[in-house]
Amino acid sequence: MSTVKIITFGKLKEILGSDFEETSYNTDELQQKLSSKFPALQTLKLRIAVNQKIISENTQLNNNDVVALMPPYSGG
Amino acid sequence: MLNLERYDRQIKLQDFGIEAQGKLAAAKVLVIGAGGLGCPVLQYLAAAGIGTIGIVDDDQVSLSNLHRQILYTSNDIGKLKTEAAFERLNAMNPEIKINIISEPVTVKNAFDIISNYELVIDCTDNFPTRYLLDDICRLMKKPLIFGAIYQYEGQVAVFNVTDKEGISTNYRHLFPEPPKPGEVADCNDAGVLGVLPGIIGTIQAAEAIKLVTGIGEPLINKIMTFNVLDYQNAIFDIPADNLINEKIPVTLDEFEQMNYELHCGIEPFEITNITASEFRERAKLPDTAVIDVREADEFPKLDLPYLSIPLSQLRASSNQINAQNIIVVCQSGKRSAVGARILNEILGPDYNISHLEGGMNELNKKIDEYN
């Protein structure tokens, strides 16, 4: 189990809060954990980045990794 | 002939010089959307001496634009944004060519409009147009500078430009499919700090100048996020995954067949508009419910019986509505239109669903006129 720092953007900041810590083995598990705590997350489109790289597959997490959760914006 | 005095201070720059200024003068850049992002983009591109600038927008200047759309003055209210922008930019720099296109960009005209330019800047304010632009620019291999804002935060990225490894990405690599209607609020509904599009648009203009002149490191295959409240910014690498998705057009013919409203989940449903002057009469009719889909802390409140269900909860709470005639209300008429669509989807055609056109803003204008 690794302790990671979560940073959030846009509406996700309103739902999850801004920056906080969470423990998890990998990004899939982390997403499940957050979705059960914050059901509103389940229906939202978002991308996950680990240490500033946007990931496309489940990714192993290490202590002190920074996990960013980013939704799309449309405003102009 | 280049006016060396006008551009003296940037020609003087190390690694810029007359050569880079010449590249700007030869460049043709298309700016789609002349709103919060478009205004600073246009202002800086015109000032910097981009030789040909195209402006696409079919909207008119309104009072609530002015806190952030800094090309326009109070005298421009009601004018086409393209025409007001042309006037202002032409006064700023009469030595460049400015083309205006005062119509919405569609699957029918996008190819022809974009063909005349080498670089496209996305300053639009809605997902259907953003996905449309992303698809056509990918298919035409046209560099696209993306910018988007939400309340106090912004995103900038450069798409369809290959990096040293020959890899290029686009918005579909970030968000292959659009969010559902109502999932992500825009400036009209969520609000925006006026300086934010100023900052994000200025970064888009900087990326355009960098791409045209070849200086620095543009945000190729990267997305930058910026928060104006704490100045936190971050740059994320975008993965160049294979985009395998039958909903994404892969040829120009497929692109022309796309319906981007539908693609973004906006169903073709004729919403009944209720004007501010007929609203009170209609609200009094039997078996009628007025639903305010604004958040609880939004004012002014309605002065007649209504049910408050914020848009984000409308799907889950539609069972609270027990009337055949439903009038959805919000601040500007935008969320109420989305709300009416959502209710139509859930409740079906047996209900008579309408919304207040122009929202509380229009309704209060009416009150002012009576007073």
Image (cartoon, coloured by chain):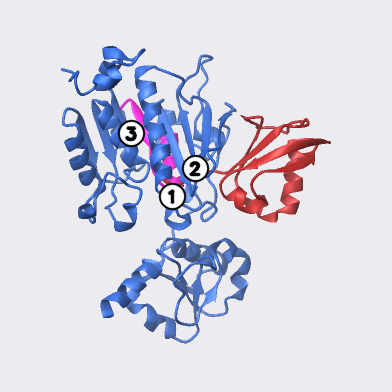
Chain colours: A red, B blue
Q: Quadrant of residue B201?
A: top left
Residue B193: mark in rendering: 1
Of badges 3 and 2, nearer the viewer stands 2
> Residue type at mark 1?
Leu
Where is residue B232 drawn, in percent x and y?
56, 37
Mark 1 and mark 2 residues within 8 Å of each other at the beta carbon: yes
Image vertical order of residue B19 relative to residue B317, above or below: above
The residue wearing badge 3 is B111
Q: Is there any visible trace of residue B310 in the rendered image?
A: yes
Where is residue B46 drawn, in percent x and y?
26, 31
- Work out whether mark 3 precedes mark 1 in sequence or the reverse, and give the earlier one: 3
- Work out whether mark 1 precedes mark 2 in sequence or the reverse, and give the earlier one: 1
Residue for point 52% across, 26% down: B221
Q: Is there any visible trace of residue B140 in the rendered image?
A: no
Q: Chain of mark 2?
A: B
Q: Quadrant of residue B191?
A: bottom left
Where is residue B137 drawn, in percent x and y?
41, 31
Outermost residue to the right: A1
- Work out whether mark 3 precedes mark 2 in sequence or the reverse, and give the earlier one: 3
Asked whether residue B132 is drawn in magenta, I would say: yes
Residue B228: mark in rendering: 2
Query: Callout 3 environment at 10 Å: few (<14), some (14 to 19), or many (20+)?
Result: some
In screen coordinates, is B123 left or right of B321? left
Where is residue B30 drawn, in percent x and y?
31, 33
Residue for point 19% across, 28% down: B96
Q: Which residues make up the magenta segment?
A: B117-136
> Residue type at mark 2?
Val
Query: Callout 1 environment at 10 Å: few (<14), some (14 to 19), or many (20+)?
Result: some
Kindly state the secondary structure of the residue where label 3 is placed. helix
Residue for point 44% across, 80% down: B303
Q: Quadrant of residue B355?
A: bottom left
Q: CA distance from mark 3 to mark 2?
A: 35 Å
